[in-house]
Structures are given as C-alpha cells and as structure tokens.
Image (cartoon, coloured by chain):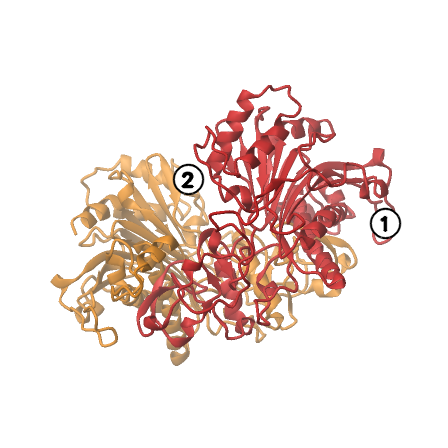
Chain colours: A red, B orange
Amino acid sequence: MSAGWFRRRFLPGGPLPGPRPAGPRSSPVPYHRPRFLRGSGSSPGSTDASRRPDVRPVRSPARGRTLPWNAGYAEVINAEKSEFNEDQAACGKLCIRRCEFGIEEDQEWLTVCPEEFLTGHYWALFDGHGGPAAAILAANTLHSCLRRQLEAVVEGMMATQPPMHLSGRCVCSSDPQFVEEKGIRAEDLVIGALENAFQECDDVIGRELEASGQMGGCTALVAVFLQGKLYVANAGDSRAILVRRDEIRVLSSECTPETERQRIQQLAFTYPELLAGEFTRLEFPRRLKGDDLGQKVLFRDHHMRGWSYKQVEKSDLKYPLIHGQGRQARLLGTLAVSRGLGDHQLRVLDTNIQLKPFLLSIPQVTVLDVDQLALQEDDVVVMATDGLWDVLSNEQVALLVRSFLTSNQKDDPHRFSELAKMLIHNTQGKDNGATGEGQVSYDDVSVFVIPLHSQAQEGSGH
Amino acid sequence: MSAGWFRRRFLPGGPLPGPRPAGPRSSPVPYHRPRFLRGSGSSPGSTDASRRPDVRPVRSPARGRTLPWNAGYAEVINAEKSEFNEDQAACGKLCIRRCEFGIEEDQEWLTVCPEEFLTGHYWALFDGHGGPAAAILAANTLHSCLRRQLEAVVEGMMATQPPMHLSGRCVCSSDPQFVEEKGIRAEDLVIGALENAFQECDDVIGRELEASGQMGGCTALVAVFLQGKLYVANAGDSRAILVRRDEIRVLSSECTPETERQRIQQLAFTYPELLAGEFTRLEFPRRLKGDDLGQKVLFRDHHMRGWSYKQVEKSDLKYPLIHGQGRQARLLGTLAVSRGLGDHQLRVLDTNIQLKPFLLSIPQVTVLDVDQLALQEDDVVVMATDGLWDVLSNEQVALLVRSFLTSNQKDDPHRFSELAKMLIHNTQGKDNGATGEGQVSYDDVSVFVIPLHSQAQEGSGH
C-alpha cells in the first residue's frame, strides 16, 4: 500500500495540502528496480518461541520455506520504497491455553504444550506506509493479542453453544434460550476475539511508536484456521481469495476511502472541526474550481448512496475529504486505506489535521466453513498485499494458480512455495502464457499460498 | 408496525421505562376483531389531481380498484388499533416536467399534461404508529416531494450519462471522463431523488405535526417504475418481493433496531448524553440483573460484529438501548423500527429521552432492471406492511400467488385485485390448502400487487 501517492491529472484545482508522492508506481521507469530479498526473518521456534513455547511465530520475509505444519508458503518482494521492506508477514501455530474454571481474575494457566487446549494456524500480512515500523510491530504483536483474546473466551468456544456466563453457571433457567434466540455461535466468539485483538494491537503500536519517536501505519490481513473454519480478518487493501478448480471465492473486502465513504463523510458531518475548515466533506466527480461557481454540479453527501445536483458555493471549492476513485482514492489527500493499525501521529502535510479519527482499527471478518467444502488437494487460499492485486485480477491469479498446480507434480513438497514465487514474478512485467500480459508492480508485494486441504486434514486430527 | 409492544418474558429485570403495550398482537384472543374497511380515499383525478394535473394520487384505503393505468391492486385491513387505519397507501402516475434550459433559479415549467417530459408510476405504503397522523401526511406529501426532487435532476436523467453540470455546459473537457470514472448513471439520480424526497417529506411532517399539536410516525415503502426500472425505497419494516414462476427476489431490506444495531450503538457511543444515564448501549443476550454482577457474560459493543465476554458492572444493569430480538426488538424500549418518517416529538415514556436522533428518514434503495427480465404475465411485485410478513414467509406468499394466478383466468381484469384480497384473508386465520396453516395477524395489513408485465409494456410505449 502506497501512502500519499496520487495521479496528478485528478487535481485540476490548487496545490494539494497532502504529503509529496512517496511511491514510484506511476512512473514509466521504476524509481528503484525491485529485487528479491533473501529471507532474513526468525525461523520457527526461535526468539519469541523459545520464551513462549505456546506461540511459534514465523516472521517475514519468510521466503518459500516449507514450514513444519504445512503452514502455507510466503514470498515477499521489496520495491525499495524504504530501506526496510514495508511489507511484513507472520505465520505460526496458534496454541490457545485453557484457564482454570472459577478462578477468574487470578488465572492459573496450563503452560506445557502437550496440555494445550486448542490449536489453530495463523497467517498475517502487514503493508506499511510512512516506514516499516508499524508493520514490524504488528508482525511481532498481533498474534499475541489474538492468543490472549481467544484464551479469554476459549471455554465459551468449546461449548456446543456459548454459555451466557463464561463460568458455565446458569443464573436464569432460560439463559440458553436467550443465547439461542440471538443466534450466538462459537464462531462469533472468534470474530469478536479478532476484532478485539486488532484494537488491542493498535493500542500497543500507538504506545510503542510514541515511546520510540517513530511514525507510520500499516494494513493488516489475517487468516486463522480454527476448529474447521477459516477466519479472514481484513483492515486495509490487501486481499484473500480461495481458488478452486471451478470457483473463485473472495474472502475479504477492501477497506478504502471509497468503500467506506459514507462512514467517513458522516464523521465529518458530526465533527466538522476534524476538517479544520480546509476540506469539504461533499463528494464531487472532480475537485471544483472557480469556473464551477454558481453552476449546478453532481454531488453526494453522507446520507446519499445516489447522486444529485447542487449549486456550487465558495466552500465547495475546498479540497475534498475523499479525492479520486478506485485505487487512486485518497483520504484527506494522504492515505489510500480507511482501516489499519498505527498512524496515531499522522497529519495532513503542513497542517494539524489528524487522520486517525477517520481510521478504524477494527477488521471486517469473513468465515469460511472449510469442513463443509469437499476440498480438493489443489484448493488454495491466496493472500496478498495490494502490490499483487494492482496488476493481477482475481481471475488472472486463479488462472495462474490452476495452470501451475496442474502442470506440477502433486508430490513436490515445494510446489506451493514455487507457486507463491511465480505469482510474485508475474507482477514484475514478465510476460507469460496464462495472462498474456506483462504488467509491472512497483510496490512491495507479499503473497501467501495456503493449501487448505492440508489444514483441514491436520485440523481433523485434533 | 406496532410501537411500544413487547413480550414480557424478555424483561426479567425491573420496570420498563417505555410506553405501555399498544397492540393486541401477542394476545391469544384479538383485542378487537379486525374487519375489512370499505374504500374511502380520494379517487383518481380528485382533490390534488384537479389542482395539479401532473400528479394523480390515489389514496388509501384503495380497495381492489382497477386503476386506469394498471397501477397495481391494493387491499387494506384495519386491526382497529386506532379509530383511523394506521396503515395508509398512495399510488398514482408520476408526471415529471422538464424545466427550461439555462433559467436555473426562476424556472419556467411546462404545465400542460401532453407536454410532460417523463412519466412513471408510484406506489407507497405507510405504516403509522402512535396514531395515523404521520402516515396520512406521508401519503399526501411524499409523491409531491419525489416529483419535485426528480424534476430538479430530470435533465441529467435523460442523458446517456448524467453531465457533470446540469446545464450541460462542459467546464473541463475531461468532465465526462470524471463522471464515467465515478460510475455515475441516470439511476443514481433517481436513487438520490428518492433519498432527498424522504428527507424533505420528513421535514414537512415534523413541521405539520408540530403546528397541529399532533404526534406519531410511520414507516415508508415506496416503489417507482421509471425508464424501465423499478426502484424500491424502504424506511421501516414493510417489505416488497418479486414473485416469478421459478424465483422469489427480495426487493427491500428491513430497517430495524437489530439490522442497524451498530449504527445505533455507535451514535450512543459518540453522544452518550442521548441515553441520559438511563440506558446501556451494550448488547447482552437478555437484560442483566443483580445476580449477574461480577460474572463474565456475553456482550457486544458498537465496533463488534462478533461477541465476547465482559465482567458485569452496575452500569450494565441499566435497560438496554436495543432490547429483544427479531421482530420483537425495540429501540429504547419503544420502537420496532430504526428508520421512518415523523416521530419528531417521540420520547421514552416518563423521560425526556428522544428517539428521533437514532432514527433515519433516509431509505435503503434497491433497483430492479425490469427491461433486462424476460417478464411473464404472472410476474408480480407484492408490497406489504409487516402485518402480512409477521404471519406469512416470502415462500408462503409466493406459493399463494402462483397457485392463485394459475387457477384464475388470465383475462379476468379483477384477478390481481382478488389476489391482494386473498393475501389479506390469509392473515386472518383462514386455513387454506397452499400454506396449510391458519396464522392470524392482529396488526393493520396492507398489500399492493403490481403486475410488472403491464408496467413494462406501458413503459415501452413512452
């Protein structure tokens, strides 16, 4: 994800009160030629894992390694927008321990691995902007937040239906009926844990960045395989899709200024002081200028999904709260995403206008019931940062995946790793038969390929 | 729609700071036996129509009349919750006049019918609560607001692509490209006009009720057939479905405290003073009581789609902002809908807590491209207030519709009228072969049956 980058032709008005272009993506010749990085992250079981035997994070760049539990295969490329890769990845086994019943505040944990209560798998991609600091912190922190949040509700998750009281005590005889009528299931506790973990991680990043005098933010895309279900939590513009022989299923939705326009405009309507008189919350097809004054032009406000016409006043000539469209849309002329972690200090260039009030750290979560799918060996989840999706459509990626897996030996232990590598190569302008195009991404690109079949088989063993 | 009604068993806690039950729906024996009303509304061409030749409203109760333009067939029943029917209906031909180009503020209208620019059809159902005043005002007003809003953008609607400037003047040569990139189509102007018309009508109702010292609110479900498309705008818990031989398509989504929980909780989070310390914005499976104090119970807050556990504090024992589930859910213990018109004065019983800040007058709008459907003669849209949907599912209604239309003569001019009547009868506990059940609605019930085929044929003649 590139922050602060925009296409000049969308700016017919005056100077932009936003940061200078940061990325080379729009240049016909790349600013720096991207190069492949050698893996330099910690290996499974190292660092944190030695201190915390119940969490075994694998940090980025995790390049084409076959992990001990068929974890999925990551490939990362640095476009050298910054010295460190702004894309960061993490994956690992998630071991959720059970707390002793009844001792609520002073919990006694079962800390030895063989007594783990519930295990799952965790994959995460973080796409930083304004430097890699937030992405690195998120890669180091989010899985711990998630484990903690899951451990806080694990007793409820293990029941057929979550009990009204975590203690299992029934205060009213009809409590199970109330829970039933609300339709609360175990998966709702995992969704809640993901939502809370993102928020907790955002708080940690805010404190850490402030303490160290650093800046920056990142998107976060997380997949968790737990109890036969795949949970995909997304805050930003990365994407996960499931590719099967006859089907593509999109597992995440992007959170951008455009997809969340009404929420953002509504906030500016409620708190106009957030715009400090510098921006207009109204949306127009382009930025207005003096010649438009007095004319009736297309616009929409926070309450509208449709469009109407309004007579242009002087205040409408201000820079728009959301400007541009599609992947070029920017919030306050600065940011291409509307959700993510960090950015606590981010301000519009040369102003005191903060972006954080408009950003949500809460992810959108989708659930895939893997146990209900008749999984084939070649069914994979592809998770990638926007660097991939900027140049390849879902259909193109699916075509590449199917073609690759068909022509490679099923018993090759490296084939998913090679597939991730091949997808990255396809963003570097290498013409190939499958897509027939040679598009180039000048952004960092990270790809996970997760063979769902292996997860389901391993999961069923627990 | 019944206001202030709730099931006692959901209230294990203390006394409810809401109004007394108003409706007899929960009683095993109806409070008043419903009876069919004779039509008493104005007939086509009367009243308003004589003054305004371009609008020909037909007001409720419009009982089984064959209207001059195959308008659809309405059937209304009064459950006698109030002396006047709280359900109100309106339908009519929508004649949208064109303003003279270039004269923007001091517009010259073409006022003679043969010179009408664009015609459409309009159907609307309003389900009042706290008396029929708001529903009657809405039935008398909304079509005028909509006509005015459409006339304000009609030039843009007639273009292949709405121009950036309503005057058609091109300030920038790339203006059409900006509109194209935003994906703005003529139908977006109709959606915008519907959104603005609902808001304008809500303002009118607020002023009129205040001036006359009256109270009340209503839901609003509007269908508009225009330029080969059917627009369905809904603010409340009425519903419209399309019934075809092999398909049921839901054309509206209900706006209830449950479907809009996050928006409502978010508002209470932003403006806690709206709850005056009397309510908790948190959602629990049931209202909490003293025995729950200190326990960890299931809950969710505004940012959560999932659930988690929290330790119960004293403030959690307050009455919940949203209470109950499904059709029993109530906002502030008072109202079953989260969008609608009116209710400007509505307060929680014995408090000064207002409901209006939580209510939206903006509808959710869906668009059906009728020209793209291979329409059959028996394809109909069924619009009805919640009195119908409380006792019949979409599938049951579709079954009744198909069975009725198959067994009735295609050339019978009264068959759609009879169908509407039959659907109403099926809410009155008459056992019948199609559903095999004899469920009873004690609410007002209104049904429109609109033969889409006729509209499309008539529309294509223009």
Q: Quadrant of residue B122?
A: bottom left
Q: Is residue B272 above or below residue A110?
A: below
Chain under callout 2: B
Q: Which residue is drawn at 51% across and 36% down?
A: A249
Residue A82 visible in the picture: yes
Camera-nearest residue between A88 and A55: A88
**SS at mark 2 in the image:** helix
Q: Mark 1 points at which residue?
A: A107
Q: In this view, does B186 lie above or below B376?
A: below
Q: Contact, CB < 8 Å: mark 2 with mark 1? A: no
**SS at mark 1 in the image:** loop
Q: How far apart are marks 2 and 1 (CA)?
A: 51 Å
Q: Quadrant of residue B157?
A: bottom left
Please identify the quadrant where the C terminus of chain A is shown: top right
Neighbour class for label 2 at 10 Å: few (<14), some, many (≥20)?
few
- Amino acid type at mark 1: Gln
Residue A374 vs residue B297: left or right? left
Chain under callout 1: A
Residue A24 vs residue B214: left or right? right
Residue A115 vs residue A276: left or right? right
Camera-nearest residue between B457 and A45: A45
Residue A174 visible in the picture: no
Number of numbered tags placed on the structure image: 2
In the image, which disc is placed on residue B293?
A: none
Q: Mark 2 points at which residue?
A: B395
x, y (%) of residue A347? 60, 66
Closest to the camera, between mark 2 and mark 1, is: 1
Q: Is residue B161 above or below residue A300?
A: above
Q: Residue at x 35, y 44 (%)?
A: B242
x, y (%) of residue A428? 53, 39
